[in-house]
Amino acid sequence: MSGQQQADAKLEIAFEFFSKLGVPYFSFHDVDVIAPATDMKEHVRNLAVM
């Protein structure tokens, strides 16, 4: 599983969890749900994907 696939799965699971908890509002940092990057260019690209 690629880093981006892992990030996508993490985001999907988080939203499912929030839904099951019945939480009407939630917050997270963008960098918590993107694939890890080795440089700034890759980091910006990963943010754009999300």
Image (tube, helix red, strand yellow):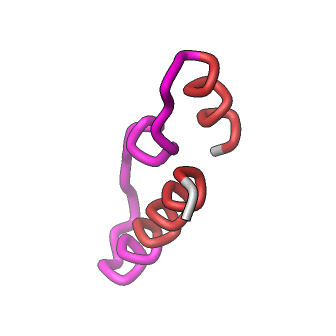
- Residue 2 or 32: which is nearer the viewer? 2
Position of residue 17 relative to residue 50, above or below, is: below
**Residue displayed at 36% across by 83% down:** 20
In this picture, residue 22 sits left or right of residue 34: left
**Residue displayed at 63% across by 18% down:** 41
Range covered by the magenta-colored residues: 16-40
Position of residue 35 relative to residue 40, above or below, is: below
The furthest residue to the left: 21
- Residue 3 or 32: which is nearer the viewer? 3
**Residue displayed at 44% across by 72% down:** 13
The furthest residue to the top: 40
Percent x, y of residue 18? 37, 70
When asked about the image quadrant of residue 17, the answer is bottom left
- Quarter of the image containing the C terminus? top right
- Residue 39 or 25: which is nearer the viewer? 39
Percent x, y of residue 29? 39, 38
Percent x, y of residue 40? 55, 16
Position of residue 34 relative to residue 48, above or below, is: below
In this picture, residue 15 sits left or right of residue 17: right
In this picture, residue 37 sits left or right of residue 49: left
Q: Main secondary structure of the magenta part?
A: loop
- Quarter of the image containing the N terminus? bottom right
| 37 in magenta | yes
